[in-house]
Image (cartoon, rainbow, N blue to C red):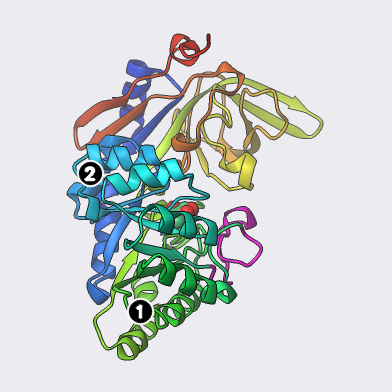
Amino acid sequence: MYIPEKHVAQNIVSDYGTPVFVTSAEVVRVNAHKLIDAFTLNDTKIFYALKANYDPQLVRIIKESGVYGIDAVAPHEVRLALEMGYTPQQIIFTPSNASDEEMRYVNEQGILQNLGSLSELTRFGKLFPGSKVLLRICPEIGAGETHKVTTGHIESKFGIARNDLEKVYNIAKKYKLLIVGIHSHIGSGFYDPQDFTNSARAVCAVAAEFPDVEFVDLGGGFGVVYRPGENDIDLSTFAQACHSPLEELEKKLGKKIELRIEPGKFLVTNTTVLLTTITTIKSKGDKKFVGVDSGFYHLIRPAMYDAYHHIVNISRPDESQEEVNVVGNVCETCDVFNGNVKLAAPQEGDILAILSAGAYGSSMSSNYNLRTLAPHVLVDGANITLTRRRQTYEQIMENFT
Ligand SMILES: Cc1ncc(COP(=O)(O)O)c(C=O)c1O
């Protein structure tokens, strides 16, 4: 987990203030190479899930590190990927309940669409008969950091149920659609390679029924470390986990099948901290509250998913530790960054680093309480660059009439 050195953090805070997201370019590169080195199987193509963090400078590093493409879930993500120089072949569009207008825009760009409902498939068929399309299936296997980010189970809103495949056939036949890939994403943040094998088996079993299939896409979700002392997952076991289902599929279809994956979290989580300043310390009942100048509008994962984010006191790292509740400045009881963390002798004015804030932190931010979005700073060796300015009140209000 990246933690900026004290003097680096202090320089950034004196130049740009807090709260501020600080990202290490080097850690992004390390993560990209770990994935590329582990997934050599079946010409694996890696598509970065842009939803995790869409800072263009970060995406540029991911691209330069050799990660093949982008998994985009919304039209503006497609647009950003195109503006960053990805070719249409390097982009997959995986919408959730796409409108006709969205499908039209993406089709005009020549980008393959990954559709997860009979409705979307039918509307796509009517709009673009004879086209290639990718199917998002529900593998009936869910895994993830918490229930709210588990996607592959039958009760979730995602994917086409396996017992609807007959209907898929009929729609594809009627509109002469070529189903060139089968996709599943079982959830975000899983740690057991067996879950990946099960997902690969489910996807490959469906793919075997579609002779036009050229690739299978097993989504993202590779688990990352949020607590100090935990071990990184061994990515090679995850790559190995899909070997035999793919081999069987190739035998059945009698051709080479490419593997695709779409990691978000794994590439960016541990690259970034959210630096924030302690404004208020108070004790109430048997609790000590350490109040900071940020809130769930910058990092919603603890409030929304009960996610754990470790926190360190950058200002005095060596002093003895005490257990505290680090809380934000939003008028909501759930605005707690960490209700049970040991911090070194916190004092008002200290700078805290909330760790592993690179994925689903800034990208899920909001203007709740009219709070402004935080700036981004990129640390690349000795170079420190502001990659996003702090939002202003005027920028929040400019579209109100
Ligand atoms: C379709 C799809 N692919 C990939 C991802 C990336 O997941 P993660 O960031 O956990 O790797 C997501 C995120 O939920 C997703 O919805």
Q: Label 2 belongs to which residue?
A: 61
Among the 4 quarters of the image, the one containing residue 182: bottom left
Q: Is residue 160 visible?
A: yes
Judge by depth and name the residue closer to the eye, 179 or 355.
179
Asked if the residue under mark 1 is in contact with the one under mark 2, i.e. CB atoms within 8 Å, the reply is: no
Q: Residue 317: x percent and y percent? A: 46, 35
Q: Residue at x 33, y 37 (%)?
A: 23
Residue type highlighted by circle 2 = Ile
Q: Residue at x 29, y 62 (%)?
A: 35
Q: Which residues are magenta?
A: 138-156
Residue type highlighted by circle 1 = Gln
Q: Residue 266: x percent and y percent? A: 39, 55
Q: Residue 165: x percent and y percent? A: 52, 75
Q: Is residue 133 left or right of residue 398?
A: left
Q: Quadrant of ligand 1?
A: bottom left
**For the residue labelled by badge 1, is the local secondary structure a helix, a strand or a loop?**
helix
Q: Label 1 belongs to which residue?
A: 240
